[in-house]
Amino acid sequence: MITEITDQNFDEETKEGVVLTDFWATWCGPCRMQAPILDELSSERDDVKFTKMDVDQNPKTPQSFGIQAIPTLLIKKDGEIKERVVGFHPKDQLNQILDKYAK
């Protein structure tokens, strides 16, 4: 399951464990391609929390991280940013990245 988060609850929702946040927008084609892959991963992996944030409705958080291209996936572990993945990525590549932090 993917949790929809906002500027207001971003810090709270991403402060513990391994959390992947998908920064996306409804008009973004690559974001729409990435979404089903993230849905699949979220149902297969219970060692990672999956969240997503609409950058049009929540401009503060993406701006604070200097996110200029979407989709951008931000991976945090215990509140600390570990990796930033920009653009569309296939499932096995995302699994490999997540394995570095969530084993």
Image (tube, rainbow, N blue to C red):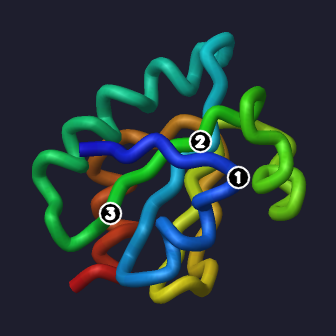
Q: CA distance from mark 1 to mark 2?
A: 8 Å
- Please state the horizontal and vertical placement of residue 24, each as a whole percent of the image: 62, 33
Q: Amino acid at mark 1?
A: Asp
- Please state the horizontal and vertical placement of residue 92, each as a whole percent of the image: 28, 51
Q: Which residue is mark 3?
A: 49
Is 94 left or right of 22, judged from the image as shown? left
Q: Which residue is mark 2?
A: 53
Disc 1 and disc 2 in contact, CB within 8 angstroms: yes
Describe the element under mark 3 as helix, strand or loop: strand
Q: Earlier in the sequence, mark 1 or mark 2?
A: 1
Describe the element under mark 1 as helix, strand or loop: loop
Q: Amino acid at mark 2?
A: Met
Question: In this picture, is 63 found above or below 10?
Answer: above
Disc 1 and disc 3 in contact, CB within 8 angstroms: no
Closer to us: 41 or 8 = 8
Q: CA distance from mark 1 to mark 3?
A: 17 Å
Density class for disc 3 (Cα within 10 Å; few <14, some 14-19, many ≥20) is many
Quadrant where the N terminus is found in the figure? top left
Q: Nearer the viewer, mark 1 or mark 3?
A: 1
- Please state the horizontal and vertical placement of residue 65, each as a whole percent of the image: 81, 63
Q: CA distance from mark 2 to mark 3?
A: 13 Å
Density class for disc 2 (Cα within 10 Å; few <14, some 14-19, many ≥20) is many
Describe the element under mark 2 as helix, strand or loop: strand
Q: Amino acid at mark 3?
A: Lys
Closer to us: 82 or 13 = 13
Residue lying at 51% horizontally and 80% vertically, measured from the top left: 15
Is 69 left or right of 26, judged from the image as shown? right
